[in-house]
Image (spheres, rainbow, N blue to C red):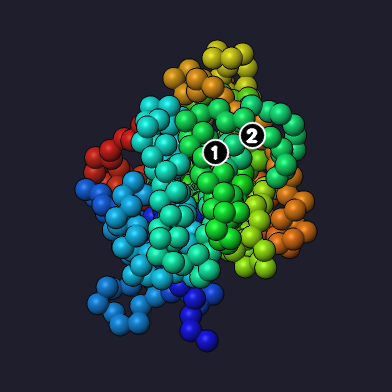
């Protein structure tokens, strides 16, 4: 049997990297769409990438953008994929308030462009499409836990764009009989998570503070509650969603929710620092209660976390907790990681990352600071 061909948009992102790894391990030929950038942007998949001159390579990258139908049609025509995973998106909720039109174009209309390309090229019976939908669709809490039947109430330009993408996927499935599905994925994280999402910001901050490379960590709303899983588990669910007899939409979640504040405590605890919070709202701060970190002793009472209202969102999503019953029953999907394991892996990876930085700093090299 000839090998299956997959096309991934957003291949350079967190999920794109784990999904590429998974599909390659299953014998797929994987094509990815990457954006042109003034710097290399393939860090997350460089370990999988093969020299373009190698014959028989099974990971092939194409330049493209979800805002440009011409390149999408050309690439899909050339690749003739069995499966398309549409993971490309401006995926930062807070930034979507700053770039709402671009977000609508890439995240909303971008999905239409993919569906329409498949239709125009006559591939509706051949190509299966996965759309990266999101728990942000639930937005303002209507009911918990949130399932496939819970009403949507998006709370950001990002979520509104993704709502369009959700429904246009359903519409193309119903109108043209396409195998097109939404995975409504709740937050999923990993050491590859973008540095400006809250979990990674916290694990990086905890690692740097514990190593004497940073003084304090500034955060926004500590009360928000999220259902956090591991990206490695979630790409397995994406794959399974496209292997069913009938195309359907699925919630992918752990069913456990945790506040940002608790994530902070867990991450610092991994470095030997016990943090306690005092105060309220934007006056709330996190203080060191004890420090058993052998490498770098922090004094008890030191303020290591503070709230900066600049990270608050104009409209917030307060509580997400998913009901994974359908995916457990129909996809036989169950996460392998729990939150503790996820936090441990993320903090350990960031400590390793900053050990390199510390070595350079101690040897007299200037380390650049990157703030968010
Ligand atoms: P990332 O932000 O890590 O990756 C996004 C990817 O999309 C990157 O490869 C990025 O390219 C690419 N991209 C951005 N804009 C465009 C564009 N205009 N055209 C083509 N590609 C573009 O996101 P994740 O991997 O975390 O998420 C994957 C998808 O799943 C996204 O659609 C996200 O909205 C959605 N999602 C994520 C969840 C999560 O918790 N991680 C939960 C639910 C849904 P570049 O590297 O050049 O920036
Ligand atoms: P989210 O993830 O908005 O849920 O979207 P993010 O990690 O950005 O925020 C989670 C919660 O933490 C609060 N928060 C902060 N967030 C950030 N980024 N920075 C901070 O300093 C901070 N302090 C508190 C936020 O207010 C929020 O409540 C992610 C993205 O991956 C989306 O693409 C995806 O669709 C959803 O998850 C599911």
Residue 242 seen in this snapshot: yes
Disc 2, ligand 2: is the CB inside 8 Å? no
Work out which quarter of the rendered image holds the C terminus and state it: top left
**Element at badge 2?**
loop
Q: Is residue 79 left or right of residue 217?
A: left
Q: CA distance from mark 1 to mark 2?
A: 8 Å
Q: What residue do we see at 67% from left, 48% from top? A: 251
Q: Is residue 214 above or below residue 2?
A: above
* Residue 202 x %, y %: 51, 36
Residue 207 seen in this snapshot: no
* Residue 291 x %, y %: 58, 33
Q: What residue do we see at 28% from left, 38% from top? A: 368
State the mark number for residue 152: 2
Q: Are marks 1 and 2 in contact (CB under 8 Å)?
A: yes
- Outermost residue toward the front in this view: 175
**Sooner in the amino-acid sequence: mark 1 or mark 2:** 2
Q: Is residue 162 above or below residue 99?
A: below
In depth, the one of 273 and 178 nearer the eye is: 178
**Element at badge 1?**
helix
Mark 2 closeness class: few <14, some 14–19, many ≥20 residues within 10 Å: some
* Residue 229 x %, y %: 63, 48
> Mark 1 sits on what residue?
163
């Amino acid at each position: 049997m000839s090998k299956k061909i997959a096309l991934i948009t957003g291949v350079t992102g967190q999920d794109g990297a784990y999904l590429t790894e998974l599909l390659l391990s299953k014998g797929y030929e994987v094509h990815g769409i990457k954006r042109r950038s003034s710097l290399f942007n393939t860090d997350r998949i460089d370990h999988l990438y093969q020299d373009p001159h190698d014959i028989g390579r099974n990971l092939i990258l194409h330049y493209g953008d979800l805002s440009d139908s011409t390149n999408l049609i050309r690439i899909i025509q050339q690749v003739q994929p069995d499966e398309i995973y549409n993971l490309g998106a401006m995926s930062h909720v807070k930034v979507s308030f700053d770039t709402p039109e671009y977000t609508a174009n890439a995240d909303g209309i971008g999905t239409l462009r993919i569906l329409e390309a498949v239709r125009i090229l006559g591939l509706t019976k051949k190509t299966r499409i996965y759309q990266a939908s999101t728990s942000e669709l639930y937005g303002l809490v209507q009911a918990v836990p949130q399932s496939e039947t819970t009403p949507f109430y998006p709370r950001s330009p990002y979520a509104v764009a993704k709502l369009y993408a959700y429904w246009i996927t359903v519409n193309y499935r119903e109108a043209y009989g396409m195998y097109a599905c939404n995975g409504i994925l709740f937050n999923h994280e990993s050491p590859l998570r973008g540095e400006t999402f809250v979990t990674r910001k916290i694990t990086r901050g905890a690692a740097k503070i514990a190593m004497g490379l940073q003084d304090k960590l500034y955060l926004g709303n500590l009360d928000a509650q999220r259902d956090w899983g591991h990206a490695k588990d979630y790409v397995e669910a994406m794959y399974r969603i496209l292997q069913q007899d009938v195309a359907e939409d699925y919630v992918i979640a752990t069913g456990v929710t945790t506040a940002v504040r608790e994530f902070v405590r867990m991450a610092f605890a991994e470095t030997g620092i016990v943090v306690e919070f005092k105060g309220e709202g934007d006056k709330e701060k996190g203080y060191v209660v004890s420090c058993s970190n052998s490498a770098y002793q922090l004094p008890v009472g030191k303020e290591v976390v503070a709230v900066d209202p600049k990270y608050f969102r104009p409209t917030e999503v307060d509580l997400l907790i998913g009901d994974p019953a359908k995916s457990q029953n129909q996809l036989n999907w169950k996460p392998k990681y729990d939150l503790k394991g996820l936090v441990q892996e993320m903090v350990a990876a960031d400590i390793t990352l900053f050990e390199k930085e510390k070595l350079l700093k101690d040897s007299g090299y200037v380390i650049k600071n990157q703030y968010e």
